[in-house]
Amino acid sequence: MRELDLLIRGGRIVNAGDSFRSDIGIKDGEIAAIGTEIGPARRIIEADGRLVFPGGIEAHCHIDQESSGGIMTADDYYSGSVSAAFGGNTCFVPFAAQHRGQSLADVLNTYHERAAPKSVIDYSFHLIVSDPTEKVLNEELPAAFAQGITSFKIFMTYDKLIVDDSQMLDILAVARRHGALTMVHAENNAMIKWMSGRLEERGYGEPRFHAPSHPRAAESEAINRAVELATFIDTPVLIVHVSTEEGARRIAEARYAGHKVFGETCPQYMFLEARDMDLPDVEGAKFCCSPPLRDKATQQKIWRALQNGTFQMYSSDHAPYRFDETGKLSAGSKPSFTRVANGLPGIELRLPLLFSEGVNKGRISLHHFVALAAANAARIYGMDHRKGSITEGKDADIAIWDPQLTRVVSHADLHDNMDYTPYEGMKLTGWPVTVIRRGQIVVHDGALCVERGSGEFIARRPIDTTGMPGKLAPELDPARNFGARLL
Ligand code: URP
Ligand code: ZN
Ligand code: ZN
Protein backbone atom coordinates (compact mmCIF):
# COMPACT_ATOMS: atom_id res chain seq x y z
CA MET A 1 0.00 0.00 0.00
CA ARG A 2 1.48 3.37 -0.99
CA GLU A 3 2.26 5.85 1.76
CA LEU A 4 -0.03 8.83 2.01
CA ASP A 5 1.27 12.30 2.76
CA LEU A 6 -1.49 12.97 5.25
CA LEU A 7 -4.35 11.06 6.81
CA ILE A 8 -7.32 12.75 8.44
CA ARG A 9 -8.75 10.16 10.76
CA GLY A 10 -12.17 9.71 12.27
CA GLY A 11 -14.00 12.91 11.38
CA ARG A 12 -17.46 13.42 9.96
CA ILE A 13 -17.13 14.51 6.35
CA VAL A 14 -19.81 16.92 5.20
CA ASN A 15 -20.30 17.87 1.55
CA ALA A 16 -23.13 19.90 0.08
CA GLY A 17 -24.93 16.68 -0.81
CA ASP A 18 -23.82 14.00 1.65
CA SER A 19 -22.30 13.38 5.02
CA PHE A 20 -20.57 10.33 6.47
CA ARG A 21 -17.88 9.27 8.91
CA SER A 22 -14.65 8.33 7.16
CA ASP A 23 -10.93 8.83 6.91
CA ILE A 24 -9.38 10.92 4.15
CA GLY A 25 -6.06 10.11 2.55
CA ILE A 26 -4.09 12.85 0.85
CA LYS A 27 -1.29 12.40 -1.66
CA ASP A 28 0.43 15.01 -3.87
CA GLY A 29 -2.06 17.71 -2.92
CA GLU A 30 -5.12 15.71 -3.91
CA ILE A 31 -7.68 13.63 -2.10
CA ALA A 32 -6.33 10.18 -2.89
CA ALA A 33 -8.75 8.01 -0.93
CA ILE A 34 -11.83 8.22 1.24
CA GLY A 35 -12.62 5.22 3.43
CA THR A 36 -11.13 3.21 6.26
CA GLU A 37 -7.78 1.44 6.38
CA ILE A 38 -6.59 3.45 3.44
CA GLY A 39 -2.93 3.17 4.15
CA PRO A 40 0.02 4.32 6.13
CA ALA A 41 0.66 8.03 6.19
CA ARG A 42 3.59 10.27 6.98
CA ARG A 43 1.34 12.42 9.15
CA ILE A 44 -1.99 11.80 10.83
CA ILE A 45 -4.49 14.35 12.05
CA GLU A 46 -7.07 13.03 14.47
CA ALA A 47 -10.51 14.43 13.68
CA ASP A 48 -12.71 12.47 16.04
CA GLY A 49 -15.64 14.64 17.14
CA ARG A 50 -14.82 17.17 14.44
CA LEU A 51 -16.62 18.20 11.27
CA VAL A 52 -14.59 17.92 8.10
CA PHE A 53 -15.71 20.39 5.45
CA PRO A 54 -14.39 21.34 2.02
CA GLY A 55 -12.19 24.41 2.44
CA GLY A 56 -14.21 27.59 2.23
CA ILE A 57 -14.14 29.66 -0.95
CA GLU A 58 -14.45 33.38 -0.30
CA ALA A 59 -15.79 34.67 -3.60
CA HIS A 60 -16.22 38.39 -2.93
CA CYS A 61 -13.42 40.33 -1.25
CA HIS A 62 -11.23 43.34 -1.91
CA ILE A 63 -7.53 42.71 -1.35
CA ASP A 64 -4.66 45.08 -2.19
CA GLN A 65 -7.13 47.06 -4.28
CA GLU A 66 -7.32 50.80 -4.90
CA SER A 67 -10.84 52.17 -4.60
CA SER A 68 -12.03 54.55 -7.30
CA GLY A 69 -11.30 57.30 -4.76
CA GLY A 70 -7.65 56.19 -4.63
CA ILE A 71 -7.76 54.54 -1.19
CA MET A 72 -5.89 51.27 -0.75
CA THR A 73 -7.40 48.42 1.22
CA ALA A 74 -5.63 47.65 4.50
CA ASP A 75 -5.08 44.00 3.58
CA ASP A 76 -2.63 42.78 0.99
CA TYR A 77 -2.48 39.21 -0.29
CA TYR A 78 -0.55 38.10 2.76
CA SER A 79 -2.69 39.45 5.60
CA GLY A 80 -5.88 38.96 3.56
CA SER A 81 -5.13 35.33 2.76
CA VAL A 82 -3.91 34.53 6.29
CA SER A 83 -7.08 36.01 7.73
CA ALA A 84 -9.18 34.06 5.23
CA ALA A 85 -7.34 30.84 6.13
CA PHE A 86 -7.93 31.30 9.87
CA GLY A 87 -11.60 31.67 8.95
CA GLY A 88 -11.70 28.25 7.29
CA ASN A 89 -11.02 29.26 3.67
CA THR A 90 -8.57 27.63 1.29
CA CYS A 91 -9.31 29.71 -1.79
CA PHE A 92 -10.49 33.24 -2.51
CA VAL A 93 -11.44 35.34 -5.49
CA PRO A 94 -10.62 39.02 -4.92
CA PHE A 95 -11.19 41.72 -7.53
CA ALA A 96 -8.69 43.00 -10.06
CA ALA A 97 -10.01 46.50 -10.61
CA GLN A 98 -9.75 48.34 -13.90
CA HIS A 99 -9.79 52.09 -13.44
CA ARG A 100 -10.60 54.17 -16.48
CA GLY A 101 -7.87 54.30 -19.07
CA GLN A 102 -6.20 51.08 -17.89
CA SER A 103 -5.84 47.99 -20.04
CA LEU A 104 -7.14 44.75 -18.57
CA ALA A 105 -3.85 43.01 -19.34
CA ASP A 106 -1.97 45.58 -17.24
CA VAL A 107 -4.53 45.29 -14.46
CA LEU A 108 -4.23 41.51 -14.39
CA ASN A 109 -0.43 41.62 -14.44
CA THR A 110 -0.50 43.98 -11.47
CA TYR A 111 -2.79 41.73 -9.46
CA HIS A 112 -0.84 38.59 -10.34
CA GLU A 113 2.27 40.40 -9.04
CA ARG A 114 0.44 41.36 -5.87
CA ALA A 115 -0.93 37.89 -5.19
CA ALA A 116 1.73 35.39 -6.27
CA PRO A 117 4.50 36.21 -3.78
CA LYS A 118 2.12 36.61 -0.84
CA SER A 119 -1.01 34.50 -0.87
CA VAL A 120 -1.10 31.48 1.44
CA ILE A 121 -4.32 30.18 -0.09
CA ASP A 122 -5.28 29.55 -3.70
CA TYR A 123 -6.76 32.44 -5.61
CA SER A 124 -8.35 33.67 -8.77
CA PHE A 125 -9.60 37.13 -9.71
CA HIS A 126 -12.85 38.67 -10.83
CA LEU A 127 -12.16 41.65 -13.07
CA ILE A 128 -13.88 44.96 -12.41
CA VAL A 129 -14.68 46.56 -15.76
CA SER A 130 -15.16 50.32 -15.62
CA ASP A 131 -13.99 51.33 -19.10
CA PRO A 132 -15.59 49.09 -21.74
CA THR A 133 -13.87 50.43 -24.85
CA GLU A 134 -14.06 48.53 -28.14
CA LYS A 135 -10.61 47.09 -27.41
CA VAL A 136 -11.62 45.99 -23.93
CA LEU A 137 -14.79 44.37 -25.24
CA ASN A 138 -13.41 42.71 -28.33
CA GLU A 139 -9.87 41.81 -27.33
CA GLU A 140 -9.04 42.27 -23.67
CA LEU A 141 -12.04 40.65 -22.01
CA PRO A 142 -11.92 37.57 -24.29
CA ALA A 143 -8.18 37.30 -23.58
CA ALA A 144 -8.86 37.39 -19.83
CA PHE A 145 -11.56 34.73 -20.14
CA ALA A 146 -9.13 32.54 -22.07
CA GLN A 147 -6.71 32.80 -19.12
CA GLY A 148 -9.36 31.40 -16.78
CA ILE A 149 -10.72 34.65 -15.40
CA THR A 150 -14.30 33.92 -16.28
CA SER A 151 -16.22 36.44 -14.17
CA PHE A 152 -16.21 40.19 -13.81
CA LYS A 153 -18.09 42.86 -11.95
CA ILE A 154 -19.73 45.99 -13.26
CA PHE A 155 -21.14 48.91 -11.30
CA MET A 156 -24.43 50.74 -11.80
CA THR A 157 -23.28 53.43 -9.35
CA TYR A 158 -20.12 55.33 -8.30
CA ASP A 159 -19.18 58.12 -10.75
CA LYS A 160 -15.77 56.68 -11.58
CA LEU A 161 -16.92 53.11 -12.10
CA ILE A 162 -20.48 53.32 -13.41
CA VAL A 163 -21.41 51.83 -16.78
CA ASP A 164 -24.60 53.03 -18.44
CA ASP A 165 -27.32 50.78 -19.82
CA SER A 166 -25.99 50.64 -23.36
CA GLN A 167 -22.49 49.82 -22.07
CA MET A 168 -24.07 47.12 -19.92
CA LEU A 169 -25.72 45.61 -22.98
CA ASP A 170 -22.39 45.54 -24.82
CA ILE A 171 -20.68 43.93 -21.85
CA LEU A 172 -23.42 41.35 -21.32
CA ALA A 173 -23.25 40.42 -24.98
CA VAL A 174 -19.50 39.72 -24.68
CA ALA A 175 -20.12 37.65 -21.56
CA ARG A 176 -22.74 35.63 -23.38
CA ARG A 177 -20.47 34.97 -26.31
CA HIS A 178 -17.71 33.62 -24.06
CA GLY A 179 -19.66 31.90 -21.27
CA ALA A 180 -18.49 34.41 -18.66
CA LEU A 181 -20.44 35.51 -15.62
CA THR A 182 -21.36 39.15 -15.08
CA MET A 183 -21.59 40.28 -11.46
CA VAL A 184 -23.51 43.48 -10.86
CA HIS A 185 -23.36 46.09 -8.11
CA ALA A 186 -26.96 47.14 -8.50
CA GLU A 187 -27.85 50.54 -7.07
CA ASN A 188 -29.44 53.46 -8.90
CA ASN A 189 -26.78 56.18 -9.07
CA ALA A 190 -29.17 59.10 -9.62
CA MET A 191 -31.32 58.24 -6.60
CA ILE A 192 -28.26 58.01 -4.37
CA LYS A 193 -26.82 61.30 -5.59
CA TRP A 194 -30.18 63.05 -5.34
CA MET A 195 -30.72 61.89 -1.77
CA SER A 196 -27.13 62.55 -0.72
CA GLY A 197 -27.28 66.09 -2.11
CA ARG A 198 -30.47 66.90 -0.23
CA LEU A 199 -29.23 65.43 3.03
CA GLU A 200 -25.94 67.31 2.85
CA GLU A 201 -27.70 70.59 1.90
CA ARG A 202 -29.68 70.31 5.12
CA GLY A 203 -26.56 69.65 7.17
CA TYR A 204 -27.11 65.93 7.63
CA GLY A 205 -23.57 64.73 7.12
CA GLU A 206 -23.01 62.24 9.96
CA PRO A 207 -22.31 58.60 9.04
CA ARG A 208 -25.83 57.51 10.00
CA PHE A 209 -27.22 59.44 7.02
CA HIS A 210 -25.41 57.04 4.74
CA ALA A 211 -28.37 54.63 5.13
CA PRO A 212 -31.16 56.97 3.91
CA SER A 213 -28.87 58.26 1.16
CA HIS A 214 -29.06 54.80 -0.42
CA PRO A 215 -32.83 54.22 -0.53
CA ARG A 216 -34.08 50.67 -0.71
CA ALA A 217 -35.69 51.51 -4.04
CA ALA A 218 -32.26 52.42 -5.43
CA GLU A 219 -31.35 48.76 -5.01
CA SER A 220 -34.56 47.19 -6.27
CA GLU A 221 -34.77 49.51 -9.30
CA ALA A 222 -31.23 48.67 -10.32
CA ILE A 223 -31.66 44.93 -9.72
CA ASN A 224 -34.77 45.04 -11.84
CA ARG A 225 -32.92 46.82 -14.64
CA ALA A 226 -29.92 44.51 -14.45
CA VAL A 227 -32.18 41.46 -14.62
CA GLU A 228 -34.13 42.85 -17.58
CA LEU A 229 -30.97 43.73 -19.50
CA ALA A 230 -29.39 40.33 -18.82
CA THR A 231 -32.60 38.55 -19.75
CA PHE A 232 -32.82 40.54 -22.97
CA ILE A 233 -29.31 39.38 -23.88
CA ASP A 234 -30.06 35.91 -22.47
CA THR A 235 -26.95 35.65 -20.35
CA PRO A 236 -26.46 34.80 -16.67
CA VAL A 237 -26.06 37.58 -14.16
CA LEU A 238 -25.18 37.52 -10.47
CA ILE A 239 -26.46 40.35 -8.29
CA VAL A 240 -23.92 40.89 -5.52
CA HIS A 241 -24.36 42.07 -1.93
CA VAL A 242 -28.16 42.26 -1.88
CA SER A 243 -29.46 44.11 1.18
CA THR A 244 -33.24 44.39 0.80
CA GLU A 245 -36.28 42.15 0.68
CA GLU A 246 -37.45 43.92 -2.48
CA GLY A 247 -34.15 43.13 -4.18
CA ALA A 248 -34.28 39.50 -3.06
CA ARG A 249 -37.84 39.17 -4.33
CA ARG A 250 -36.88 40.49 -7.74
CA ILE A 251 -34.16 37.84 -7.95
CA ALA A 252 -36.53 35.10 -6.77
CA GLU A 253 -39.18 36.15 -9.31
CA ALA A 254 -36.64 36.17 -12.12
CA ARG A 255 -35.46 32.68 -11.18
CA TYR A 256 -39.04 31.47 -10.92
CA ALA A 257 -39.62 32.81 -14.42
CA GLY A 258 -36.67 30.74 -15.63
CA HIS A 259 -34.07 33.46 -15.99
CA LYS A 260 -30.39 32.89 -15.33
CA VAL A 261 -30.07 35.06 -12.26
CA PHE A 262 -27.98 34.38 -9.17
CA GLY A 263 -28.04 36.31 -5.91
CA GLU A 264 -25.47 36.99 -3.22
CA THR A 265 -25.78 38.41 0.25
CA CYS A 266 -23.21 39.08 2.97
CA PRO A 267 -22.94 38.72 6.76
CA GLN A 268 -23.35 42.46 7.34
CA TYR A 269 -26.93 42.29 6.07
CA MET A 270 -27.70 39.38 8.40
CA PHE A 271 -25.85 40.40 11.57
CA LEU A 272 -25.60 44.21 11.57
CA GLU A 273 -28.16 47.01 11.37
CA ALA A 274 -28.40 50.63 10.24
CA ARG A 275 -28.63 51.54 13.93
CA ASP A 276 -24.99 50.51 14.26
CA MET A 277 -24.14 53.71 12.38
CA ASP A 278 -25.62 55.83 15.21
CA LEU A 279 -22.35 55.80 17.17
CA PRO A 280 -21.00 59.09 18.58
CA ASP A 281 -18.71 61.37 16.57
CA VAL A 282 -17.81 59.65 13.34
CA GLU A 283 -17.51 56.13 14.74
CA GLY A 284 -20.55 55.17 12.71
CA ALA A 285 -18.20 55.33 9.71
CA LYS A 286 -16.96 51.90 10.78
CA PHE A 287 -20.31 50.56 9.60
CA CYS A 288 -20.62 52.41 6.27
CA CYS A 289 -20.84 50.08 3.32
CA SER A 290 -22.84 50.08 0.11
CA PRO A 291 -25.57 49.01 -0.11
CA PRO A 292 -25.96 50.17 3.49
CA LEU A 293 -27.05 48.23 6.54
CA ARG A 294 -30.83 48.06 6.88
CA ASP A 295 -33.25 47.48 9.78
CA LYS A 296 -33.91 44.45 12.00
CA ALA A 297 -36.96 43.31 10.03
CA THR A 298 -34.94 43.33 6.83
CA GLN A 299 -32.23 41.20 8.41
CA GLN A 300 -34.83 38.50 8.94
CA LYS A 301 -35.96 38.73 5.30
CA ILE A 302 -32.39 38.39 4.14
CA TRP A 303 -32.01 35.28 6.29
CA ARG A 304 -35.21 33.95 4.74
CA ALA A 305 -33.90 34.53 1.22
CA LEU A 306 -30.69 32.71 2.14
CA GLN A 307 -32.68 29.81 3.58
CA ASN A 308 -34.99 29.47 0.59
CA GLY A 309 -32.20 29.49 -2.00
CA THR A 310 -32.81 32.93 -3.49
CA PHE A 311 -29.18 33.62 -2.59
CA GLN A 312 -26.79 30.94 -3.72
CA MET A 313 -23.80 32.99 -2.69
CA TYR A 314 -22.83 34.15 0.78
CA SER A 315 -19.65 36.22 0.73
CA SER A 316 -17.95 38.60 3.11
CA ASP A 317 -17.45 41.53 0.69
CA HIS A 318 -14.37 42.10 2.85
CA ALA A 319 -13.42 45.70 2.01
CA PRO A 320 -10.96 46.60 4.75
CA TYR A 321 -10.54 50.32 5.41
CA ARG A 322 -9.05 51.15 8.80
CA PHE A 323 -10.64 53.71 11.09
CA ASP A 324 -7.82 56.17 10.45
CA GLU A 325 -6.46 58.52 7.80
CA THR A 326 -5.48 55.61 5.52
CA GLY A 327 -9.09 54.43 5.32
CA LYS A 328 -12.39 55.61 6.72
CA LEU A 329 -10.99 59.01 7.71
CA SER A 330 -8.93 59.69 4.57
CA ALA A 331 -11.08 62.77 3.84
CA GLY A 332 -10.46 64.24 7.32
CA SER A 333 -11.38 63.52 10.90
CA LYS A 334 -15.05 64.47 10.50
CA PRO A 335 -15.97 63.55 6.92
CA SER A 336 -19.47 63.79 5.52
CA PHE A 337 -20.89 60.31 4.93
CA THR A 338 -20.39 60.85 1.17
CA ARG A 339 -16.62 60.94 1.73
CA VAL A 340 -16.27 57.86 3.93
CA ALA A 341 -14.66 54.87 2.21
CA ASN A 342 -17.35 52.24 1.76
CA GLY A 343 -16.83 48.74 3.00
CA LEU A 344 -16.56 46.45 6.02
CA PRO A 345 -14.07 43.76 7.00
CA GLY A 346 -15.33 40.20 7.55
CA ILE A 347 -13.22 37.64 5.69
CA GLU A 348 -12.23 35.70 8.85
CA LEU A 349 -15.66 35.69 10.45
CA ARG A 350 -17.88 34.96 7.43
CA LEU A 351 -18.03 31.22 8.14
CA PRO A 352 -17.95 31.20 11.97
CA LEU A 353 -20.87 33.67 11.91
CA LEU A 354 -22.87 31.48 9.54
CA PHE A 355 -22.10 28.29 11.44
CA SER A 356 -22.94 29.72 14.84
CA GLU A 357 -26.05 31.64 13.88
CA GLY A 358 -27.13 29.50 10.95
CA VAL A 359 -26.35 25.86 11.74
CA ASN A 360 -26.40 26.02 15.53
CA LYS A 361 -29.65 27.99 15.62
CA GLY A 362 -31.34 25.56 13.23
CA ARG A 363 -31.75 28.03 10.39
CA ILE A 364 -29.74 26.04 7.83
CA SER A 365 -28.51 22.45 7.60
CA LEU A 366 -24.87 21.42 7.62
CA HIS A 367 -25.20 20.67 3.90
CA HIS A 368 -26.55 24.10 3.19
CA PHE A 369 -23.67 25.54 5.19
CA VAL A 370 -21.19 23.73 2.93
CA ALA A 371 -23.07 24.87 -0.17
CA LEU A 372 -22.76 28.48 0.97
CA ALA A 373 -19.24 28.11 2.29
CA ALA A 374 -17.69 26.48 -0.77
CA ALA A 375 -19.70 24.29 -3.12
CA ASN A 376 -21.86 26.95 -4.75
CA ALA A 377 -18.94 29.28 -5.33
CA ALA A 378 -16.94 26.43 -6.87
CA ARG A 379 -19.78 25.59 -9.25
CA ILE A 380 -20.94 29.09 -10.10
CA TYR A 381 -17.44 30.45 -10.64
CA GLY A 382 -16.12 27.49 -12.63
CA MET A 383 -13.81 25.83 -10.10
CA ASP A 384 -15.72 22.68 -9.26
CA HIS A 385 -13.38 20.50 -11.31
CA ARG A 386 -10.89 21.09 -8.47
CA LYS A 387 -12.62 22.61 -5.49
CA GLY A 388 -15.76 22.76 -3.36
CA SER A 389 -16.18 19.16 -2.28
CA ILE A 390 -14.37 16.34 -0.52
CA THR A 391 -14.16 13.88 -3.39
CA GLU A 392 -11.38 11.61 -4.58
CA GLY A 393 -9.30 13.32 -7.26
CA LYS A 394 -10.11 16.88 -6.17
CA ASP A 395 -7.69 19.25 -4.50
CA ALA A 396 -7.21 18.36 -0.84
CA ASP A 397 -8.75 21.61 0.39
CA ILE A 398 -10.21 20.84 3.79
CA ALA A 399 -11.29 22.70 6.89
CA ILE A 400 -11.63 20.72 10.12
CA TRP A 401 -14.03 22.40 12.51
CA ASP A 402 -14.58 21.99 16.22
CA PRO A 403 -18.34 22.43 16.46
CA GLN A 404 -18.23 22.86 20.26
CA LEU A 405 -15.56 25.53 20.49
CA THR A 406 -16.97 28.83 21.76
CA ARG A 407 -15.14 32.12 21.42
CA VAL A 408 -16.06 35.73 21.91
CA VAL A 409 -15.03 37.75 18.87
CA SER A 410 -12.23 40.17 19.60
CA HIS A 411 -10.34 42.01 16.92
CA ALA A 412 -7.15 41.24 18.80
CA ASP A 413 -7.59 37.56 17.82
CA LEU A 414 -8.12 38.18 14.11
CA HIS A 415 -5.38 38.11 11.49
CA ASP A 416 -6.37 40.89 9.13
CA ASN A 417 -4.61 44.23 9.03
CA MET A 418 -7.61 46.15 10.31
CA ASP A 419 -7.98 48.08 13.54
CA TYR A 420 -11.55 47.00 14.33
CA THR A 421 -14.16 44.37 13.59
CA PRO A 422 -17.84 45.27 13.36
CA TYR A 423 -18.61 41.94 15.06
CA GLU A 424 -16.65 42.68 18.27
CA GLY A 425 -18.08 40.93 21.34
CA MET A 426 -20.27 38.38 19.54
CA LYS A 427 -20.18 34.93 21.12
CA LEU A 428 -19.79 32.29 18.41
CA THR A 429 -19.75 28.51 18.71
CA GLY A 430 -18.05 26.42 16.04
CA TRP A 431 -14.63 27.38 14.65
CA PRO A 432 -12.16 25.94 12.16
CA VAL A 433 -9.14 24.45 13.91
CA THR A 434 -7.15 22.94 11.03
CA VAL A 435 -7.11 24.24 7.47
CA ILE A 436 -5.46 22.28 4.67
CA ARG A 437 -4.87 23.64 1.18
CA ARG A 438 -3.84 21.20 -1.56
CA GLY A 439 -2.64 18.86 1.14
CA GLN A 440 -0.52 21.43 2.95
CA ILE A 441 -1.48 22.33 6.50
CA VAL A 442 -2.01 26.08 6.43
CA VAL A 443 -3.44 26.57 9.92
CA HIS A 444 -3.27 24.16 12.84
CA ASP A 445 -4.29 24.86 16.43
CA GLY A 446 -3.95 28.61 16.11
CA ALA A 447 -0.65 28.65 14.22
CA LEU A 448 0.12 29.52 10.61
CA CYS A 449 2.14 26.67 9.10
CA VAL A 450 2.95 27.74 5.52
CA GLU A 451 5.14 30.22 3.71
CA ARG A 452 3.87 33.32 2.02
CA GLY A 453 3.36 32.74 -1.69
CA SER A 454 2.42 29.07 -1.31
CA GLY A 455 -1.08 29.71 -2.73
CA GLU A 456 -1.59 29.13 -6.46
CA PHE A 457 -3.56 30.87 -9.17
CA ILE A 458 -6.58 28.80 -10.21
CA ALA A 459 -7.67 29.05 -13.84
CA ARG A 460 -11.45 28.83 -13.92
CA ARG A 461 -13.79 27.39 -16.52
CA PRO A 462 -16.60 29.12 -18.39
CA ILE A 463 -19.85 29.26 -16.48
CA ASP A 464 -21.78 26.00 -16.41
CA THR A 465 -25.49 26.63 -16.70
CA THR A 466 -26.45 22.98 -16.22
CA GLY A 467 -29.40 22.73 -13.89
CA MET A 468 -29.98 26.45 -13.86
CA PRO A 469 -33.38 27.78 -14.68
CA GLY A 470 -33.52 28.83 -18.32
CA LYS A 471 -30.42 26.91 -19.41
CA LEU A 472 -28.72 28.76 -22.25
CA ALA A 473 -30.88 28.06 -25.27
CA PRO A 474 -28.99 27.18 -28.46
CA GLU A 475 -31.90 28.28 -30.60
CA LEU A 476 -33.21 31.51 -29.15
CA ASP A 477 -36.83 32.38 -29.59
CA PRO A 478 -36.66 35.49 -31.79
CA ALA A 479 -40.08 36.69 -30.78
CA ARG A 480 -39.15 36.54 -27.12
CA ASN A 481 -35.63 37.74 -27.46
CA PHE A 482 -34.81 39.63 -30.61
CA GLY A 483 -31.76 41.19 -28.93
CA ALA A 484 -30.00 37.86 -28.66
CA ARG A 485 -30.41 37.27 -32.41
CA LEU A 486 -28.35 40.36 -33.13
CA LEU A 487 -25.31 39.27 -31.13
O1 URP B 1 -19.24 49.08 0.50
C1 URP B 1 -18.77 48.18 -0.16
N1 URP B 1 -19.46 47.11 -0.46
N2 URP B 1 -17.50 48.30 -0.60
C2 URP B 1 -16.81 47.42 -1.39
C3 URP B 1 -17.00 47.68 -2.84
C4 URP B 1 -18.22 47.02 -3.39
O2 URP B 1 -19.04 47.72 -3.94
O3 URP B 1 -18.37 45.81 -3.27
ZN1 ZN C 1 -20.25 46.40 -4.96
ZN1 ZN D 1 -17.40 44.31 -2.83
Image (cartoon, rainbow, N blue to C red):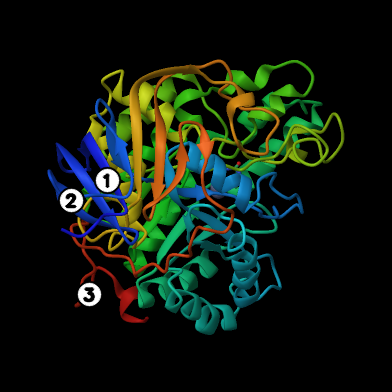
Residue of label 2: 39
Q: For the point 51% across and 42% down, which residue is it? A: 84
Query: Are the residues tagged 1 and 2 within 8 Å (C-beta)?
Result: yes
| Mark 3 to mark 2 CA distance (whole Å) | 53 Å
Give, as a three-letter code, the residue at label 3.
Leu
Q: Amino acid at mark 2?
A: Gly
Any mark on residue 86, and which?
none
Looking at the image, is 410 positioned above or below residue 321? above
In whole angstroms, how far apart are the C-alphas of marks 1 and 2? 8 Å
| Marker disc for residue 7 | 1
Q: Quadrant of residue 398?
A: top left
User: Pointer 3 and pointer 2: residues touching (CB < 8 Å)?
Assistant: no
Quarter of the picture holding the C terminus: bottom left
The circle drawn on residue 476 is: 3
Q: Nearer the viewer, mark 3 or mark 2?
A: 2
Task: Tell me if I can see residue 310 in this picture.
Answer: no
Neighbor class of circle 1 (other Cα within 10 Å; few <14, some 14-19, many 20+) is many
Look at the numbered disc 1 and say if its residue's Cβ is closer than 8 Å to ligand 3: no
Tell me the SS state at disc 3: loop
Occupied quadrant, residue 486: bottom left
* Label 2 lies in ligand 3 vicinity (Cβ under 8 Å): no
As shown in the figure, which amino acid type bears the numbered disc 1? Leu
Q: Earlier in the sequence, mark 3 or mark 2?
A: 2
Left or right placement of residue 345 versus residue 245 in this view: right
Q: Secondary structure at mark 2?
A: loop
At a point 59% along the width and 40% down the height, the residue shown is: 290
Q: Position of residue 260 (x, y in %)?
A: 29, 58
